[in-house]
Image (cartoon, rainbow, N blue to C red):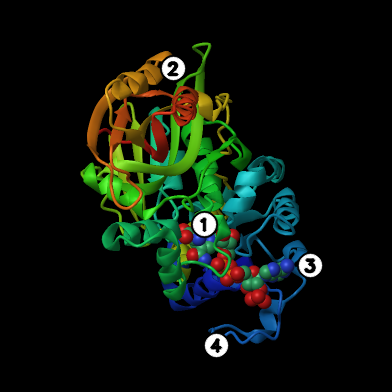
Amino acid sequence: MTSPVRLALLGCGTVGAEVVRLLHEQSADLAARVGAPLEIAGIAVRRIGRDRGDLPVDPALFTTDALGLIKRDDVDVVVEVVGGIEPARGWLVEALRAGKSVVTANKALLAEDGGALHDAAAEGGGDLYYEASVAGAIPLLRPLRESLHGDRITRVTGIVNGTTNFILSAMHATGAGFAEALEEATELGYAEADPTADVEGFDAAAKAAILASLAFHTRVAAADVHREGITEVTAADVASAKAMGCTIKLLCIAARGADGQGREAVSVRVHPAMIPVTHPLASVGDAFNAVFVEAEAAGQLMFYGRGAGGAPTASAVLGDVVAVARNRLAGVRAASESAYADLPVRPMGEALTRYHISLDVADRPGVLEAVAGVFARHDVSIATVRQGPAAGAAGAAGDAVLVIVTHVAPDAALAATVQQLRGLDIVRSVASVLRVEGGL
Ligand code: NDP
Ligand code: HSE
């Protein structure tokens, strides 16, 4: 057998520990698939003395000197499952420039400064693989960066955050409010002690940037992504969606289209949206992820599975380790970053979307005309209008609820319409505004 491919494992937490376990349990199969044994040269952690249970690994392999480990001549592949921007960026740039291959699950770093990693990989001649960074176990990035390279992707729509999907699914199923559903997610171990990155959409925005970069051959960073979280979604919004035959999901949407001057551009956004219960993404419940890809020749493709968790994420990491190890043995590297299209990312105001607007209004002659006039002034076409009696204690006698769904329009025009509606004296309140995706 050929001499081993030696791995430096950076991080041994939720994901890293499962990587160690799988490397141990599957060692014979992995060696047969790679053509050489995979060996752990060392494991960098923050706390050497931490209790790691019955992890099947020699305790002497642990070190707190990640950089020293990376620089060792007997390390071929660096597997980074620590997370965060620094020191991970410095470690990985160092490793790649030195010609080592890197496998990472670090979506935050890839979305913040993926360019620095790709440039370092090109300089050093090693591979940079990051399948686990988006949607955990789901094989998604490899199809985007290899299988679909003969096609033209037009749109990627995904549920890429399990925590928020659990919360929104619970709100839909039980009628609970956001706070109550978050509490349940925390109790069950889905939400972290500080859930900000998930519920405010930062995690999904990082993943959206990675997906858009691969789909459109363009460097897209997290800062380019329009981001809204789910903290403002109310039980009333969910009930309103249900009444329309819809459910609310936190979507990441990356789409190709023309900008204001007719030039090709992309828009990348993360926000809650109503989708019909018949949409393939509507049935994605619990903490699962799913991504819907539309391409000109392939048509519609759906990827579904576990987006998080130690073992599912380690599965994706190990798949990458096998790929880069094989490449090293063959003396080749995978195709480098494809960013040739370099398309501009257009602002959210230019993104084409639809709104569902629920208004508490005075129920008297001329109200509908006044409301419709605001939409017309902003060149926003109304698709449906539904009127009912004012609901609950908030509704006063002589009030009504108007539920309006628009046709597609630039987001800026829709937002300006809502702003002007708020100023009408016949509008008591704008009870809810939600974007609508996937047809109604
Ligand atoms: P954990 O917090 O569970 O583990 C982090 C590991 O990194 C720990 O072993 C910790 O050491 C080590 N570490 C932290 N700081 C340093 C440092 N300065 N030097 C050396 N080691 C350090 O994280 P996860 O395993 O959950 O996540 C790892 C990566 O995988 C992140 O990028 C995350 O975004 C990504 N990811 C995670 C998923 C999941 O479900 N958990 C899903 C998809 C991606 P110690 O053990 O001593 O504390
Ligand atoms: N916090 C993330 C989620 C983990 O809830 O999906 C996977 O990236």
Number of other residues with Cα within 10 Å of mark 4, as a class: few under 14, some 14 to 19, many 20 or more = few
Label 1 near ligand 2 (CB < 8 Å): yes
Instruction: Give 200 or 78, whichever is nearer the viewer.
Output: 200
Q: CA distance from mark 4 to mark 2?
A: 62 Å
Which residue is rendered at x = 59% and y = 56% of the image?
A: 106
Which residue is rendered at x = 56% and y = 31% of the image?
A: 218
Q: CA distance from mark 1 to mark 2?
A: 34 Å
Number of other residues with Cα within 10 Å of mark 1, as a class: few under 14, some 14 to 19, many 20 or more = many
Q: Quadrant of ligand 1?
A: bottom right
Among numbered discs 1 and 3, the one appearing first in the sequence:
3
Q: Amino acid at mark 1?
A: Asp
Which residue is labeled 1 in the image? Answer: 198
* Left or right of residue 186: residue 400: left
Q: Image quarter for residue 398? A: top left
Q: Amino acid at mark 4?
A: Gly
Q: CA distance from mark 1 to mark 3?
A: 33 Å
The answer to whether residue 281 is visible is no
State the SS at label 4: loop
Mark number, residue 53: 4
Using the image, determine if residue 172 lies above or below residue 281. below
Which residue is rendered at x = 58% and y = 39% of the image?
A: 336
Q: CA distance from mark 1 to mark 4?
A: 28 Å
Q: Are marks 2 and 3 in contact (CB under 8 Å)?
A: no
State the SS at label 3: helix
Among numbered discs 1 and 4, the one appearing first in the sequence:
4
Mark number, residue 68: 3
Q: CA distance from mark 4 to mark 3?
A: 26 Å
Which residue is labeled 2 in the image? Answer: 378
